[in-house]
Structure formats: structure tokens, C-alpha cells
Image: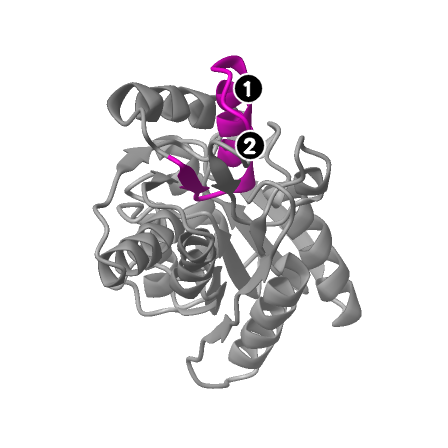
Amino acid sequence: MAGSVALVVGEPLSRVFSEDPLFALVSRSVSRELGDVDRQLVLMLGTGPGSSARIERYVAGGHVDGVMLVSMHAADPLPGAIDRIGVPVVSYGRPAPSVPIGFADSDNPSGARLAVNHLLNRGRRTVATIAGPPDMIAGQDRLAGYLGAVGDAGHRAHVVHGDFTRQSGAEAMARLLAAEPDVDAVFAANDLMAIGALQTLRRAGRRVPDDVAVAGYDDFEAARFTHPPLTTVRHPVAEQVGAMTRLLVDRMGGGPLASIVLPAELVIREST
């Protein structure tokens, strides 16, 4: 037994060490959870094609007893490659359907529906979304929730994409205003893009929420300190990491393939 577990983050360094707090929150939570079960954390960054081969060699060499995957893109071959090695593996978030591994996730489609239905119930008629990257499962799931909510309400969808960064949210909001000047609500697929949208709306002279209501997703700490404070969907990072750890420990002990999906919770603040 190696006594270690690899946390593999499938993002470039610019994302892992940027303004996005997700990766730091996940790393801290995983380290704490593994300490409770007497395992050492090995952090590995999948920053490019060469790094994927290096990670595969390391895992195949028996240096870790299990692998946790974070932020895998749908076309990334690494989850399937690690699964074929035979080392127990779980994913933080739902993996691509073609990869038969367990995962812990929050209910992203339902969370998006909660946010969009809240906007609709407040009387908003032109509800747009700043969706996440199309090749990321969380982005796909949150977009599906948005589309389902506006479709059920008989409204037309207005979709622009960002990359989960604040700058992409600001740019996407500018494109929305140019294409749909009458937009009166925006659901952004994460809080960073929502914060970018707030900045663009402020520069454009649009009042929030009087002219345009804005909702995000994640409920990271910054959401409480935007102007106005941001309505958002809570992303239960600690609970999700705890569930992922339990799944992996059980899998390393010979347990069956299993997954856990945590419920979504809407946090209503002054931006809507």
C-alpha cells in the first residue's frame, strides 16, 4: 500500500492559480479529508499532453492507492486511461458518460433551474444565460437546466458562452447587450462570470436589479461582497469532497462502483 492518493486537476496553471477559488477550496478539503483516513495527498496538474502521459506513468507505477479527478473536460482521455490502469478512481463532478467511474457531484441542472425560475417568478421576461465551456460537464448541465426552465415557461433562450472567468463574463455580457438590448435578467453559470457581467452592466449604465437582474452559481465568498450582493446557487464544496473521499476509500477497500449527487440550494440576495 502506497499510503497516498493523487488529486489530478485537469486545468492549465493559469486556471488553477488564478482568481477562481474552486481549486484551492477543493485541495484544502481533500487534504483535510485524507488526513482523517491517514492518507497523503499528491497534487498533480494535467497542464498539457505531456503531463497526461506523466500522470499515467506515475499512477501505473503504484505510487498511489487511488485517484481523484477534478475539472476534467469531456474529451480528456485521462479519466479513461486511469480507469484502464485499474487503480480506484472517482471524479469530483460527473464525468463524460463514456467513462465508467464513480463521482460526487451537486445537482447542477436543478440548481440552474432554481436560479432561472426565481428570475422568471420575479417577472423577468427576457432571461439570458452566460453558459460555461461547452466541453465541460458542469457547463453542459447548468445550460441544460437553464434551457429546461425557459422552455417550460414558453420563453426564448438567449445563450452566450464564457470560460468560467470574470473577464469572459464581462465580455459575454457586452455581447448580450449588443444582441438583446431588452434583456432584463441573466443567469451566469458561475459567480466569476456573474461578477464580470455586473461590471459590464455598471459601465453600460444598467441598474442591478432594477434594469437587469443577475444570478450566479457557486456561492463563493466573493458573492456576498459584490455590489449588489449576488443571488447564486450554493456549490457545496466541502460536502462534495467528503462524499468523493468516502467513495474512493470504499472503492479502495473493494467496494462497488457508486456515485452521489447532492441537492442544490438557491441563495437569494439583492442582485435579483
Give the vertical position of 238 relative to 204 (above or below).
Answer: below
Q: Quick one: label 1, few (<14), some, or many (20+) residues within 10 Å?
A: few
Residue 137 x, y percent position in the rendering: 35, 52
The magenta region covers 184-208
Query: Camera-side residue: 31 or 226?
Result: 226
Query: Camera-side residue: 264 or 271?
Result: 271
Q: Residue at x 55, y 43 (%)?
A: 44
Instruction: Locate the N terminus by quadrant.
Output: bottom right
Q: Residue at x 49, y 19 (%)?
A: 200
Lower sequence index among marks 2 and 1: 1
Give the vertical position of 63 relative to 170 (above or below).
Answer: below
Residue 227 x, y percent position in the rendering: 67, 30
The amino acid at mark 1 is Arg
The amino acid at mark 2 is Val
Describe the element under mark 2 as helix, strand or loop: loop
Q: Quick one: label 2, few (<14), some, or many (20+) residues within 10 Å?
A: some
Residue 61 visible (yes or no) = no
Residue 202: assigned label: 1
Residue 175: assigned label: none
Q: Image quarter for residue 158?
A: top left
Q: Is residue 34 left or right of residue 124?
A: right
Residue occupied by mark 2: 208
Q: Is residue 230 left or right of residue 254?
A: right
Query: Camera-side residue: 269 or 91?
Result: 269
Describe the element under mark 1 as helix, strand or loop: helix
Q: Are marks 2 and 1 in contact (CB under 8 Å)?
A: yes
Residue 224 x, y percent position in the rendering: 71, 42
Q: Residue at x 40, y 32 (%)?
A: 163
